[in-house]
Image: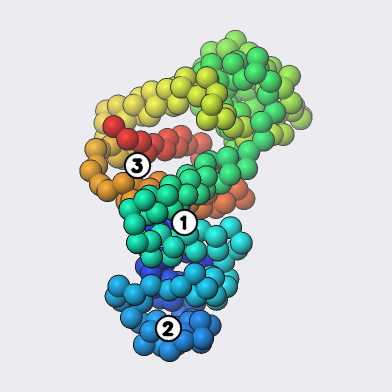
Amino acid sequence: MIISVYSTTDYKSLILDWINHPANKKSSSRKALAEALNCQTPFVSHVLNGDYHFSAEQAEACAQWMHLSEQETNYFILLVLWARAGTKSLKSHLFKQIQRIREDETVLKKKVKFENALSWENQTIYYSSWQYAAVHMALLIPQLRTLDALEDHFKIPQKRLLQIINFLLEMGLIKEENRSFKVMKPMLHLENTSTLLLQHHTHWRLKALESFQNTQQTQQNRQLSYSGAISLSAEDFEWMKQRLSNLLKEVSDKIKDSPDEKLICLNFDCFEI
């Protein structure tokens, strides 16, 4: 599935996006869809452009034609049933199921696979300061794999730096090789229910503010920042969360094998106010 089926609650726009996607244009058209549904092409156009709807059977056939997975097919059929529903009660019942599926798909731990190698006690140490994660990730960069290089880069006192390094060594997150350090376990993750999550986010957002202030003072545009209040529909809010979640997964997949050259902070927020 090239286009995320969970990016919308409008099954018609999803089909049109599928048909118009460059990767599908050679083999996908309204005529091809009509053949898959065993109906006439004008009927497909009436559905996609008007108030007609596919039946549940046609929805299932359409999902097969789009090569959806079993889970995606269930979601797609729900969209069709929701669009066809004739009472507010049924629409509300179906939409709750749709929202539940979309929310499950936006849970970060299902989008990005992390390894959690720390006990609760050691998590309280690792997430007590931004410095632990920063040094941990910095050691992926070849130029920063020595104590002197880390001290020069972060301007952290050597005593404090040694405390952090020793902790990372004890946890098996890094190991020492020929007077330099190598990362053994590159990524950790806090569950959404963790009581440490608030201070973890707070540390990095304070670093973002510090970076913003430094950028203004030096007049260097070295960061991408956006803050703003937005008014939108409940449906579009769900769409936006899904798109941002998909973007985060794309970023994670892209940088997984990316050469380690720069250390950055990525803060990602989308919430109701």
Can the viewer see residue 267 in this picture?
yes
77 or 72: which is nearer to us?
77
Which x, y percent locates residue 35?
Answer: 51, 87
The residue identified by callout 1 is: 6
Q: Residues within 10 Å of mark 2 (few under 14, many from 20)?
A: some
Q: In the image, which disc is placed on residue 64?
A: none
Which is more N-terminal, label 2 or label 1? 1
Comparing marks 2 and 3, which lies closer to the viewer? 2
The amino acid at mark 3 is Leu
In the displayed structure, 230 sits above or below 150; it is below
Three-letter amino acid code at disc 2?
Answer: Arg
Residue 51 in the image: state x and y as whole percent.
30, 73
25 vs 44, nearest the viewer: 44
What distance separates the C-alpha of mark 2 from that of mark 3?
A: 41 Å
Examine the rendering and report whether any part of residue 23 can be seen: no
**Residue that carries the numbered disc 2 in the rendered image:** 30
Q: How many marks?
A: 3
Q: Residue at x 42, y 22 (%)?
A: 202
Q: Nearer the viewer, residue 2 or 225?
A: 2
Q: Residue furthest top?
A: 159
> Splitting the image into 4 quarters, where does residue 208 fall?
top left
Q: Quick one: label 3 or label 1, which is nearer the N terminus?
A: 1
User: Vertically, is 251 above or below 148?
Assistant: below
Q: Where is mark 3, residue-wise? A: 224
Assess whether mark 2 and mark 1 are in contact (beta carbons under 8 angstroms): no
